[in-house]
Image (tube, rainbow, N blue to C red):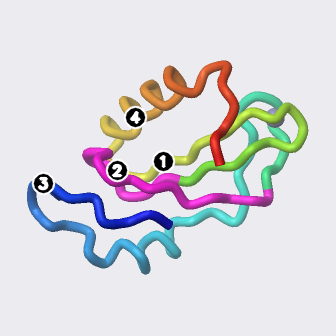
Amino acid sequence: MRHGSPGQTGRRRLRRSRKRLAELRPDALHCKHCNTTIPEVHTMDTTGMEGIEAAFAGVCGHCMRTTWSLKGNPEAVAMTKVAIEDSTAGSGVAG
Ligand SMILES: [Zn+2]
């Protein structure tokens, strides 16, 4: 876990995010590409993702692609998904 990013802008919302995250976190994801169940769900850092309450991701053991699950305001979710898919297309996932 890295922390200490300066310049947290705007309203200090989601101080409760830890607990909220646990509530939102799915037990498993389903691969968007081949529909395989992904039992290992990673909680992602949503810092800087406007309108996103929580983000989860898992790597499919079958096709090795990453599936994301985003929670938040629907518009933000849609935009963030596009951004993620753009930036991760064809690349591996850095650990
Ligand atoms: Zn898959």
Mark 4 sits on what residue?
Answer: 80
At mark 1, the secondary structure is strand
- State the separation of the CA atoms marked 1 and 3: 21 Å
* CA separation in Å, label 2 and label 1: 7 Å
Foreground: 63 or 76? Answer: 63
Q: Is residue 37 left or right of residue 22?
A: right
The residue carrying mark 1 is 70
Q: Is residue 71 above or below residue 82?
A: below
* Residue 83 picture quarter: top left
Residue in view at x 12 percent, y 54 percent: 9
| Lower position in the chain sequence, tag 3 or tag 4 | 3
User: Is disc 2 in contact with disc 1, using a CB cutoff of under 8 Å?
Assistant: yes
Residue bearing mark 2: 52
Dot placed on the residue nearer the N-terminal end, 2 or 1: 2
Mark 1 Cα within 10 Å, few/some/many (few <14, many 20+)?
Answer: many
Residue occupied by mark 3: 9
Q: Report crowding for label 3: few under 14, some 14 to 19, many 20 or more residues within 10 A (C-alpha).
A: few
